Image (cartoon, grey):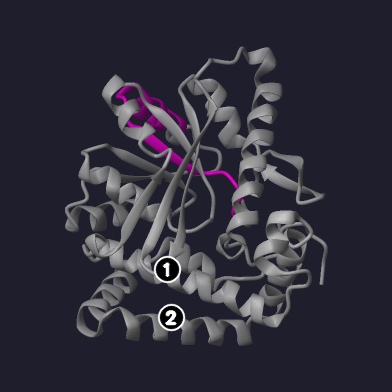
Amino acid sequence: MKSSVRWNEVAEVGTSFALRFGGWFHRSFGRRPSLALAALTAFYFNLRNGPGRRASARYLARVATTPGGRAVLGASPGWRHVLRHFREIAICTYDRMVVYSGAIDTLKLEQDGTERIFDIARTGRGALLLGAHVGNLDLLGFVAREHHLRINIVAHFDNAERVNAFFETLGANELRLIALVPGSVRAAMEIRACIDRGEIVVVMADRTPPGVEAPVESVDFFGRAANFPLGPFLLAGVMGCPVYFALCVRNGDARYTGILRPISHGERIPRAERNQGARRMLVSYVALLEEVCERYPYQWFNFFDFWEEGG
């Protein structure tokens, strides 16, 4: 997939300076001025990012062809909808800063299946959570931290050690980043060890980062074929642990809902059937992603040409 946006990649990963600055601004000026600053930031990037605007418009138009999406967006989304899409990522990024500043108690989290995480923890069995660039999954991780659940986040990220050190400064010792390095098996070994210890591993499964060579599978997504990474689902078949679709979406000011849906109960897939099993899980994952995007269309943060339609 071709990426035409860099600012949202930085927002997704975040830096210790940005997170600390956001926390300071929140503590010093409160939520309302902070949200106003987030809105101005969104407006600025909306003006500067023509390819991102066009990609957002194409995505919202596709969602609007579904009954659920049409109920939220109307029949033909326009520039106001695109601006709101940009504003949504700014708000969720701000709330990430609130979370990492230690003020998670100012946000309210409702449960929609996420209580299953605690059931998994009681059994001592590890689990794989397949997330997406939707909403604010960090919030779910910090709630799990309160219950002393070890969360391992798998990502294509160069400076994992620095981020892990930053987590430690926050007292978030239960949160840990596992870096995916192309051509290396180290991450797979670390993931296996985490699962064996009964820990939770989180993998973003809705796209492959630009410049990373990885197997993909074409699946229908809002009426058109789109390439999704197959790796997370192949990994699920190898690990033989419960697999869940996991998101945390914003449903109001300072209010989020954690969503958890089962994809696989943890059957180990024989090598000869691994690709077929991975595709089955991918199709289930994409169907769940569609369902969430219909209901919360502004919260899928992929401001690039996902369907590779050009323009």
Which residue position is annotated with label 2? 38
Q: Identify which residue is drawn at 45% across, 61% down.
A: 250
In this rendering, is residue 9 above or below 265? below
**Residue 154 on image: x %, y %:** 44, 43
Number of marks in picture: 2
Q: Is residue 305 visible?
A: no
The disc label shown at residue 93, or none: 1
Question: Quarter of the image holding residue 104?
Answer: bottom left
- Determine if the magenta segment contains residue 288: no
Which secondary structure, mark 1?
helix
Whether tag 1 and tag 2 are in contact, CB under 8 A, the answer is: yes
- Is residue 239 placed above or below 173 in the rendered structure? above
The quarter of the picture where the C terminus appears is: bottom right
Name the mark on residue 109: none
Q: Which residue is at a point 66% across and 48% down the rendered structure image?
A: 290
Would residue 224 appear left or right of 96 to someone viewing this image?
Answer: right
User: What type is the residue that disc 2 sits on?
Assistant: Ala
The crowd level at tag 1 (other Cα within 10 Å; few <14, some 14-19, many 20+) is many
State left or right for residue 111 relative to residue 29.
right
Sequence-first tag of 1 and 2: 2
Classify 10 Å Cα crowding around label 2: few (below 14), some (14-19), many (20 and above): many
The structure residue drawn at horizontal position 63% and vertical position 67%, both measured from the top left corner, is 303
The residues colored magenta run 188-209
Image position of 81 with respect to 147: above or below: below
